[in-house]
Amino acid sequence: MMTLFLFTGDMLVMLFMVVVVVWVFWKSSDDSIKRSAEIPLKDEIRVDENAV
């Protein structure tokens, strides 16, 4: 019985996470999604420390 309870809870959490991702994707603009997708690609770009 406890196994079924844990499995059901895990499935509900996973459903919630999928719904949040789909909701954010539908509500965000295309430009915002593209900028967010580029964050991991631009994390190693060096910035000139002398430029202010």
Image: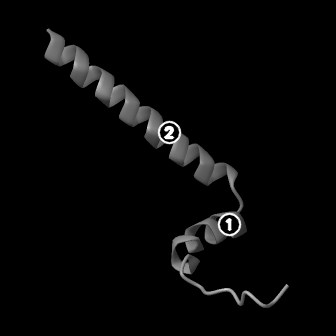
Q: Earlier in the sequence, mark 1 or mark 2?
A: 2
Crowding around mark 2 (Cα neighbors within 10 Å: few <14, some 14 to 19, many 20+) is few
Where disc 2 sits, the SS reads helix
13 relative to 25, above or below? above
Q: Give left or right: position of 23 versus 13.
A: right
What label does residue 30 carry, if any? 1
Q: Measured along the vertical axis of the image, is residue 2 above or below residue 42? A: above
Q: Position of residue 21 (x, y in %)?
A: 52, 47
- What residue is pinned by disc 2? 19
41 or 34: nearer the viewer: 41
Residue drawn where x is 57% and y is 79% of the image = 42
- Cα separation, mark 1 vs mark 2, equals 19 Å
Q: Quarter of the image holding residue 23?
A: top right
Residue at (15, 17) in percent of width and height: 3
Give the amino acid at mark 2.
Val
Q: Amino acid at mark 1?
A: Asp
Q: Label 1: how many residues lie within 10 Å, few (<14), some (14-19) or many (20+)?
A: few
Percent across and percent down for residue 11 are 31, 29
Q: Which mark is residue 13?
A: none
**Residue that appears at 68% across and 66% down:** 30
Rendered location of residue 35, percent (x, y): 66, 70
Among the 4 quarters of the image, the one containing residue 51 = bottom right
In the rendered structure, the answer to whether residue 43 lies left or right of residue 7 reads right
Quadrant location, the N terminus: top left
